[in-house]
């Protein structure tokens, strides 16, 4: 893993660096905290106190959820439904220092199906993150994380023929440096991801190779921002990448880049966000043609009242494909969500989304439509209840289509925190 050594050095620096001037500068031209969203708003009477231990605070949490899913295999016909029980223990250890920061965290998810026990899985995450505050307007932050995950049956890359869900591990490291002076802010970033997939079997018992998906993805880039005012900044961003597969899968290794220009802003007490657009390109080995086109990324929050937040998201990116004969696909996504604080301890949420994946080289387009709603009831600082519903529809078209399905989920959960 190219980045692990850098991340390890950053972790040592977080612990050993002397206390200098905090990077949290109240006079920054890039602060965007005039508005507070419904989800971000402090609720002192309903927030966990945590367990104090020296310069750290431990926050333990346990969530137990029951979910009804009417199409657990994400199939167009012969749908199977089941009730899934999930137990999710979590813990976070956070520093209380006035300068610098260090956080350790871990979580697990034990998932049990009432009738179809071949779908049972366990997932977990462990990691650490930290920040070194240097001189005014400058800091270095880093994180290192290991995850053991399960690919959802509804994922566009999940093989429908697999007898069991595909499991994989993901190691992620990132290092970010920020320097701000006057109206200019410079940001540099390194990100490293290692994917390792477990082989499986088909429903008929045949071997299903997944090792050919194992890969390393390394990203590097930077961003230059110029503040037109304390409320608005323009920027230029460049991000390169290198993707190398462990097995000699012909033509899958690639190099790419994304160049964008954009703006981040917070206009009065009404709206804030960041919007960028530009050009992206991914170049593959000789067996596959390059993939390129318009790149976009946006997040805009609208605050019609102090009790309501409306969030819009959009993106256009190049993603890795597992479809035979295709090197990748262009993924287009838009979504809108609304959060409303009905009472101080009762939150209502709703969201809708649409996505379209256009596969390269082969004839395949996937369209996804999603919707959902939830209500959160905070009984006190230790107990919270959530009831939610989600809907997802995927329609795959072309001469080499993927899966098409409709999926409905109803979830009830209780969270205990201290």
Image (spheres, grey):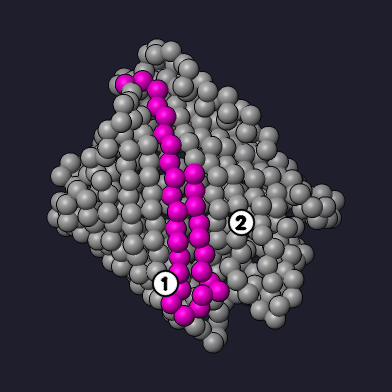
In this picture, residue 58 sits left or right of residue 247: left
Residue 42 in the image, given as x and y percentages of width and height: 22, 41
Q: Above or below — where is 414 with respect to 106? A: below
Q: Mark 2 points at which residue?
A: 168
The circle on residue 320 is none
Residue reaching furthest right? 286
SS for dot 2: strand
Q: Does the magenta stretch include residue 121?
A: yes
For the residue carrying disc 1, how many other residues have a C-alpha within 10 Å: few (<14), some (14-19), or many (20+)?
A: many
Residue drawn at 50 percent across, 57 percent down: 123
Q: Mark 1 points at which residue?
A: 84
Q: Above or below — where is 146 with respect to 185? A: below
Residue 237 in the image, given as x and y percentages of width and height: 56, 34
Q: If you read the primary sequence from the N terminus, does the residue marked by circle 2 or circle 1 appear first?
A: 1
In this picture, residue 353 sits left or right of residue 381: right
SS for dot 1: strand
The magenta stretch is 98-126
Residue drawn at 44 percent across, 45 percent down: 106
> What is the spatial separation of the Cα atoms under label 2 and label 1, in whole angstroms?
21 Å
């Amino acid at each position: 893993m190219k980045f692990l050594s850098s991340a390890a050095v950053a972790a040592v620096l977080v612990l050993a660096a002397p206390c200098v001037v905090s990077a949290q500068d109240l006079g920054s031209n890039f602060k965007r905290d005039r508005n507070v969203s419904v989800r971000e708003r402090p609720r002192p009477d309903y927030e966990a106190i945590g367990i104090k231990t020296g310069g750290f605070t431990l926050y333990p949490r346990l969530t137990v959820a029951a979910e009804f899913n009417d199409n657990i295999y994400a199939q167009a016909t012969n749908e199977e439904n089941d009730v899934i029980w999930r137990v999710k223990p979590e813990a976070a250890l956070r520093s209380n220092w006035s300068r610098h920061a260090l956080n350790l965290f871990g979580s697990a998810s034990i998932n049990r199906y009432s009738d179809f026990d071949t779908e049972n899985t366990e997932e977990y995450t462990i990691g650490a993150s930290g920040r070194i505050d240097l001189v005014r307007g400058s800091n270095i932050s880093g994180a290192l994380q290991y995850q053991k995950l399960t690919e959802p049956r509804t994922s566009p890359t999940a093989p429908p023929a697999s007898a069991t869900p595909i499991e994989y591990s993901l190691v992620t490291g990132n290092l970010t440096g920020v320097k701000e002076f006057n109206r200019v802010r410079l940001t540099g970033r390194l990100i490293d991801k290692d994917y390792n997939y477990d082989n499986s079997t088909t429903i008929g018992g045949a071997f299903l190779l997944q090792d050919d998906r194992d890969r390393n993805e390394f990203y590097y880039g930077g961003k230059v921002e110029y503040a037109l005012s304390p409320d608005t900044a323009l920027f230029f961003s460049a991000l390169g990448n290198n993707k190398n597969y462990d097995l000699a899968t012909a033509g899958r290794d690639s190099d790419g880049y994304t160049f964008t220009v954009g703006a981040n802003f917070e206009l009065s007490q009404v709206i804030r966000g960041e919007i960028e657009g530009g050009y992206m390109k991914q170049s593959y080995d000789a067996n596959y043609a390059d993939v390129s086109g318009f790149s976009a990324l946006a997040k805009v929050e609208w605050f019609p009242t102090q009790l309501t937040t409306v969030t819009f998201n959009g993106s256009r990116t190049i993603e890795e494909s597992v479809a035979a004969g295709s090197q990748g696909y262009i993924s287009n996504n838009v979504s809108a969500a609304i959060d409303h604080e009905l009472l101080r301890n009762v939150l209502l949420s709703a969201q809708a989304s649409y996505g379209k994946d256009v596969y390269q080289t082969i004839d395949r387009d996937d369209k996804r439509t999603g919707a959902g709603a939830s209500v959160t009831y905070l009984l006190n600082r230790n107990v919270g209840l959530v009831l939610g519903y989600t809907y997802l529809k995927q329609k795959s078209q072309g001469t080499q289509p993927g899966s098409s399905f409709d999926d409905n989920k109803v979830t009830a959960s209780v969270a205990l925190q201290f």
